[in-house]
Image (cartoon, helix red, strand yellow):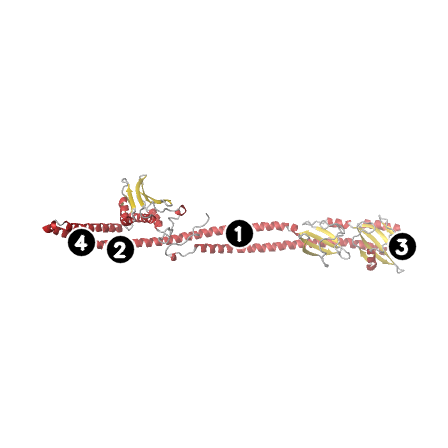
Amino acid sequence: MLKPKFWDYHDTSPHKSEHRFNFRRIWCLTVLLIAGVSLVPLISITLIDYNVTEQSIESDIMLRTARLVSNTQRSISFFITERRSALDFIVRDNTFESLTDPARLAALLDNIKKGFSGFIDLGVITHGGRQKVYAGPYNLEGRNYSKQNWYQQVLDQGVYISDVFLGFRKIPHVVIAIKRILPDGSFYVFRATLDTKQYNNLLHNLEMAGQGDAFLINHAGILQTPSRLYGKVFQKISLPVPGYAPKTRVLEGRGTNGVPLIIGYRYISNSPFILMVVKQKKEVMETWLNTRMVLIWFLCISITIILIVTLSITTHLVNRIHLADTKRVMTLHQVEFTNRLASIGRLAAGVAHEINNPLAIINEKAGLIKDLFKIKKEYQNDEKIIGLIDSVLSSVKRAGTITKRLLNFARHMDVSIETINLKKVISDVLGFLGKEAEYRSITVNLHVADDIPLFTNDRGKLQQIFLNLINNAFAAMNDGGHLDILAKKKKDKYVEIKVSDDGCGIPESLRHLVFEPFFSTKQKKGTGLGLTITHRLVHEIGGKIALESVAGKGTTFTITLPLNTKKNED
């Protein structure tokens, strides 16, 4: 239904070189050119914008994550450093004797709790590993820590900050221990316990997008604070432990379920902790995903509009070219056909004129011979000779009638408005085709109503119209067919002529193409211009032509002409 007329067009004219265009090829090239020029820049700029925007958003997310990790790391590092410095000050400001005074130690614990949050208890451990004095809520005085890992570490390092562990109290906590050398060469360890809730609250209160999770792990990947996604304290996380880096690093990774992640981490100096911030990439990129969908929809709608406009404009333009080219070729054929018909008419008129002279001489001489034979008595009663002379005179008369008809027909080929006797015009045309009808046993019935008055019109065009229609009817009929030509008045202003045959008819699917230029059902035997020219001639003399046909039963062309001449020069 949307297929343009030129798409299935095939040149059936005998002079194909007259058509200069391959319309389907022009249409395809034009569509490709316009669509390419329009779509390539659009798609290119969209892809560039897509990549630049995506990289910009990813870079911004990386920077935000890095900033969050750095700020959180500074808070935790400051928390630990501040408490370590406080303990170091206590050790330096108090002698071993004063620290081993339970009252003094309790007072120090009370004061340090007021100044710094997170402290649970204090203790002094002698060089044998036994806790000599303890200040705090648990009963840990006299406990032997010589076998504890953290105790061994502080002996080696002097200052030690432990992982989160349960210890004797079976509660997660962190120990900061400082080794102090006494004047006699021996030593003691000043130990403080920190509440891990301080870390938990700090990390829990962080504001993070993308369902982020912040937690601490030790260098073995064991959780030191609870994680929303990776488990409880002392569980090993499913993510690999990131390699050491002196600064904050942010990288992309995947979880165990393949979910894309953005992972930021930082090793906390002078501690066994690694701060981890993990975000779901899909969640943090949600804004970009929404924007991306808008961008994709914009691209799709733009491409659709460009293609619709391109196809519409190209189809319209190529249709116009096809129409113009068809009219040009049809005009050339019509001019050629008219010139050829005029030449044949002039030639026929010349021949008829030349034949008329000898016919007149033959007629005169035959008449003279007949008169001479009638004068002499020996021939007056010779019926055979008189009959032969009458046969010669009859043939000469018949030949004269034909030449006069030919001269009369040729005389009216030129354009001229004359008074028309419709019956005579049709009879003249039939006179030229009478022999073909006789040879093929075609019965021709002509009935012109008596009430049709004389009217003025172009006689030459009427002759061409009836000649074309009768020729087409003969071509459509088998031998022994019937041709009916009926003419009658219609509404006192028009005359209606029906030319009906009982030939092969025209299939319904082809009827709309009958008046199209170069359409022919005669394969290569016809030019396909006969009915096109007929349609145009009828239109030029102010008439209308209609078609009725039933395949296999016959075709009727109906011509309606005005009785008052109205010349149409279009």
Residue type, label 1? Ile
Residue type, label 2? Leu
Residue type, label 4? Ile
| Disc number placed over residue 97 in the picture, else none | 3
Question: Which residue is outermost to the top?
Answer: 491
Q: Position of residue 354 (x, y in %)?
A: 22, 55
Q: Which residue is mark 1?
A: 303
- Secondary structure category for the residue under label 2: helix
Q: Which residue is mark 4?
A: 362
- Secondary structure category for the residue under label 4: helix
Q: Are marks 4 and 2 in contact (CB under 8 Å)?
A: no
Mark 1 or mark 4, whichever is nearer to me? 4
Residue drawn 62% across the image and 54% down it: 54
Q: Earlier in the sequence, mark 4 or mark 3?
A: 3
Q: Which residue is mark 2?
A: 347
Q: Give the CA distance from mark 4 to mark 2.
A: 23 Å
Mark 4 or mark 3, whichever is nearer to me? 4
395 left or right, relative to 516:
left
Q: Give the CA distance from mark 4 to mark 3.
A: 172 Å
Q: Earlier in the sequence, mark 1 or mark 2?
A: 1
